[in-house]
Image: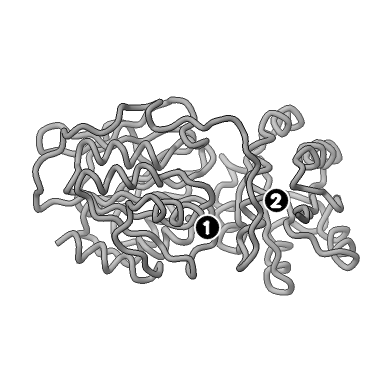
Amino acid sequence: MAKIKVMVVDDSAVVRQALQAVLDSDPQIEVIATASDPFVAAQRLKEQIPDVITLDVEMPRMDGLTFLQKIMSQHPIPVVMCSSLVETGSETLLKALEYGAVEIIQKPSLGTRQFLEESQVRICDAVKAAAQARPRRVAPQRKIEPKLTADAMLAKPRSEAMVRTTEKIITVGASTGGTEALRIFLEQLPMDSPGVVVVQHMPENFTTGFAQRLDSLCQMTVKEAADGDTVVRGRVLIAPGNRHMLLKRSGARYYVEVKDGPLVSRHRPSVDVLFRSAARYAGKNVVGVILTGMGDDGAKGMKELKDAGAVNIAQNEETCVVFGMPNEAIKTGGVDYVMALEQIAAKVLTLSR
């Protein structure tokens, strides 16, 4: 099977060398070119077109965002942004996702080589996800050590949910391509919609800016979840990057618990953890939604939701950037409806009435 061809664009020679070594260590990936800035990259593109480009944000002569816009307007190629601009530049990275970047790799400002080497699996998976983010292109994943399940965070659901009530909870999971999918979904919900809890796979410190951006666009209030936040009508809670989020219940009050813990389905936050907790504490009062994303995080949790009486929706293949997570959820038998992204919000509202 042909390898995924990658071009690495970064002004740091250390980063270029380290990233090339990390990517070349994966038998499914081959770095075919490196470039110190977008002008050099443009020359390399005339010689050979890669399947994926990794791109820094801050570079001499032309910044990464400008180059990203040029790529997407002239010859769209899946791009993985690799940048240390998260705390101070999260708005920049959100723009990168708007402009078409498929994945984000957060690298530290110091100790970059060590970070890249330690994050080998995540970086290679990001490149593979990007390679899939085109019609009819599939790059199978390496088999790595067994993944932890939601058992690592809480036991399988036992009924602690209230009987069916008039108040619903909407649980949403997403990954690759999910930032824009969530925007489209949430923008369609009116301000008095049932409370929404979301796990979107994102780096630490990135979800604050993401939630703020959605809050400025949506009728509902959107915020990064804090431990103990109440789930109420008109509010969307986004799980913080690198923290698990669980739905809990105290009497008739639903709230979220934000906590540390191991990677589950290779992710933190994990959709499986959120869905399992919702199955346990909300059961029939949940409408579950799984959106675009690579891998299978959320598939088992969605089946547990359905078994607990929830009604579930999966985004269809035609509107997904990557049809991994929805497809795996469908395979488990945990999905009731498969539909286009633009139709999901209306269906959620109907089911919530």
Q: Which mark is residue 283?
A: none
The quarter of the image holding the N terminus is: bottom right
The vertical placement of 336 against 302, above or below, is below
Q: x%, y% of residue 132? A: 62, 58
The quarter of the image holding the C terminus is: bottom left
Q: Is residue 159 left or right of residue 128?
A: left
Q: Is residue 67 left or right of residue 338?
A: right
Q: Residue at x 32, y 51 (%)?
A: 334
SS at badge 2: loop
Q: x%, y% of residue 196? A: 28, 50
Q: Amino acid at mark 1?
A: Gly
Q: Amino acid at mark 2?
A: Val
- Residue receiving disc 1: 177
Q: x%, y% of residue 149? A: 43, 32
SS at badge 1: loop
Q: Residue at x 72, y 49 (%)?
A: 56
Q: Residue at x 73, y 52 (%)?
A: 55
Q: Of residues 328 and 247, which is closer to you in this image? A: 328
- Residue receiving disc 2: 57
